[in-house]
Amino acid sequence: MNIVIIPAFFQTKSRKTLGSFFLEQARALQQKGHKVTILYCDTYSIKYVKDWFAYSEEKSEIIEGIQIYRNRCFCPLKHGIEGHREAFANGIQKLYDQYMKGNKPDIIHAHCCVWAGYAAMKLSEQIGIPYVVTEHATLFQLHRDEISEKNDKVIRKIFQKAARVICVSGAFAKLIESYRPDIDVVGNVVNCDAFVPRADSEKHRGIRFLTVCYMEEEAQLYKKGIDILIQAWTEVVKKYTDVKLAIGGGGSAKTKVEQWVEEHGISKYVEFTGALDRKQVIQEMQSCDCFVLPSRYETFGVVYIEAMACGKPVIAVANGGPDDFVKPFNGFLIEPDVKELVQAFYEMIGHLTRGNYYQEEKISNYIKSKFSYEAIAEQLEAIYNSIKSA
């Protein structure tokens, strides 16, 4: 089957792991014998005009065996969802006209309806090919009440005209069922050949916790619960001294987190790794004892399943996304609360200190059975085949 994937955001040279799960899904489908092409358009407004002039991405490249075609669009006069949506759709149309003529796909698969779903709908109308939308956006968790009536109508049209709509978690599917009641649930994918337990990983003294997130702006810190994490860690190190919290990720708001750490007087117990590429993320996950990220909002939470694929237990918030896969044998689900996180740290440290409570192989195999290339590709194939046979 010839499949075109349109992601709403994608990795760049400065953010090499952004939207990595789109690429992973493409690889999963490719390994099942499908031809997969990714079309992506970077959109810029006047606010980011400096980034426009610094643009240096390749227009055509092959990443991990997947053909990527990308371009950029500038929308200086229109702002917000409408302006970017139109610019993105026009950019995708240009990419298709330039690179895909004579190579008509069987399925268009868009990730996130607001931009990519709109582009897929417009392209579908032109070339007569069905499209699928997988929704990931926390827009429907955080800002549902702020969606204008005009944009709400467009979103509804995108979902209703799609051949199928997919959500990455059951809880998230309930948030958008008013747009489309017949929703499939297919989780994100993890490369279980790369994210694996490592018995010979780097040894360290004491217990090492790891968190990884983008720190591009302070709003992102709130969304990911980094403020909760620092406050809780301050309490933890009053009781335990043979512990370390590694914070992975870069961005302009990283200095704010460093400031918090300094103000709380816990620099001795915190390590900033800086921005991490894919290989470094794997190494950090393999060498930690537990992954923790108290996100207030997650539609899924790829970093959790990546850590668990490495055999590591996790501490996550019961916010809808991780609820589908975090169980007592592989970690803790808590509320986004400092006291609850402190207690989870205490219990996790107790389990890790006693040893053998968490079984790396069991945790890793559980993730492999649900989110490996094979598992996710089979679910997507079933959806695609049902569309083609309809």
Image: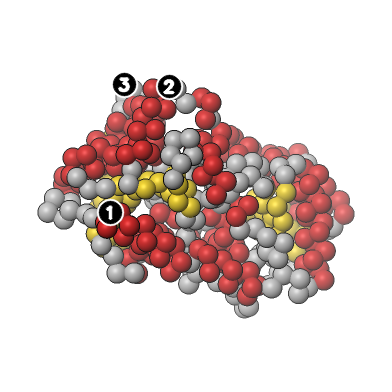
What element does badge 3 sit on? Answer: loop
Q: Which residue type does callout 2 highlight?
A: Glu
Quarter of the image that includes the C terminus: bottom left
Colouring used for the render:
secondary structure
As helix, strand or loop, the secondary structure at mark 2 comes to: helix
Identify the residue at the far front of this view. 390
Query: How many numbered marks appear?
Result: 3
Left or right relative to 248: residue 110 = left
Label 1, on which residue? 390
Instruction: Give the residue type at disc 1.
Output: Ala
Tell me the number on the disc at residue 77: 3
- Left or right of 385, for residue 21: right
**Residue 23, picture quadrant:** bottom left
Mark 1 vs mark 3, foreground winner is: 1
Look at mark 2 in the image and give the residue it sits on: 149
Dividing the image into 4 quarters, which one contains the N terminus?
bottom left
Circle nearer the N terminus (2, 3): 3
> Is residue 267 in view?
yes
User: Could you tell me which secondary element the residue under label 1 belongs to?
Assistant: loop
Q: Which mark is residue 130?
A: none
Pick whichever of labels 1 and 3 is earlier in the sequence.
3
Provide residue 184's location: percent of width, then percent of height: 45, 51
Packing grade of label 1 (10 A; few <14, some 14-19, many >=20) is few
Residue depicted at 17% across the width and 51% down the height: 99
Q: Amino acid at mark 3?
A: Leu
Q: Which residue ends up furthest to the right in the rendered image?
A: 239
Q: Is residue 200 above or below residue 341?
A: below
How far apart, in angstroms, are the residues tagged by discs 1 and 2? 33 Å
Left or right of 137 on screen, residue 225:
right
- Identify which residue, 230 or 376, lies in the foreground: 376
